[in-house]
Structures are given as structure tokens and as C-alpha cells.
Amino acid sequence: MYCRVTDVNGACCVAVDGEISRSTVVDIKSDIMAVLQTHHEIEVDLSHVEDIDTAGLQLMLAAKRYVNKRVTFFNHSAAVLRVLKLANLGQQLGDPLLIPASDMID
């Protein structure tokens, strides 16, 4: 797991790679909170997240509720979409979810 932070003209993007789980969430939270100390708005790229558990979902919800900050999650990987669907949290996070058409057919 690692987080890559890029800052372009004041817009900050945090790309998470690997898993967001009980064993990694403390480090990821630390990285995201450090960025929130210096930026009013950040985007979190989830395209390379291979696995996420309830600790990861809790981190996403906590980041969205961070006072006076705007956190947007985008490029949700299949693993993230699956867990968001199971937990029925897609709407609560309020970010656009792009769901492949093949996943719409059950």
C-alpha cells in the first residue's frame, strides 16, 4: 500500500495503491489527514485499490465529514464498488460512481 500525493496549481490528488484495510488504514489516514491540513479540497483516486474492508469504509466516511474540507473520491476500482454496493454507502459518500454496464446485469 502506498499513497502518492500530487499538487498541481493548488489542486491536490491522493492516489491510493493496494488495499485499504485494518492493517493499512492508519497509514492511509495519516497521509490523507496531513494533506487536509494544508489543502481545503482534495481528490482521492481509488483506481488502484485492490481490496477494501470496513476499516477502509470508515476512513472514507470520516474523510468526507472532515470539518470545512472537501474530499472527493473518484475512479472507484471494482473492489471498492463491490464493497460500497454491499454496504449500501454509494449515495452517502455523494461522489459519482461509474459502474460498468456488465456489472448492472444480475
Image (spheres, rainbow, N blue to C red):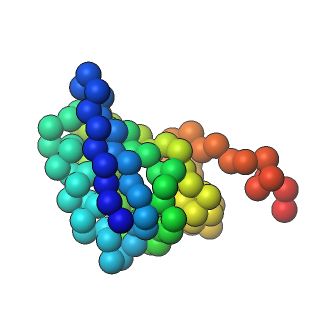
Q: Position of residue 50 (x, y in %)?
A: 51, 65
Q: Position of residue 104 (x, y in %)?
A: 79, 53
Q: Is residue 87 above or below residue 34?
A: below
- In the rendered image, which quarter is residue 81 located in? bottom right
Q: Position of residue 63 (x, y in %)?
A: 32, 51
Q: What residue is at 35 percent from the left and 65 percent from the top?
A: 1
Which residue is farthest bottom? 23
**Is 12 left, or right, of 43 in this rendering?**
left
4 or 95, which lies in front?
4
- In the rendered image, which quarter is residue 5 located in? top left
Q: What residue is at 48 percent from the left and 68 percent from the top?
A: 52
Question: Does the image show residue 92?
Answer: no
Q: Is residue 13 above or below residue 106?
A: above
Q: What residue is at 32 percent from the left and 71 percent from the top?
A: 24
Q: Is residue 97 above or below residue 58?
A: above
Q: Position of residue 68 (x, y in %)?
A: 23, 37
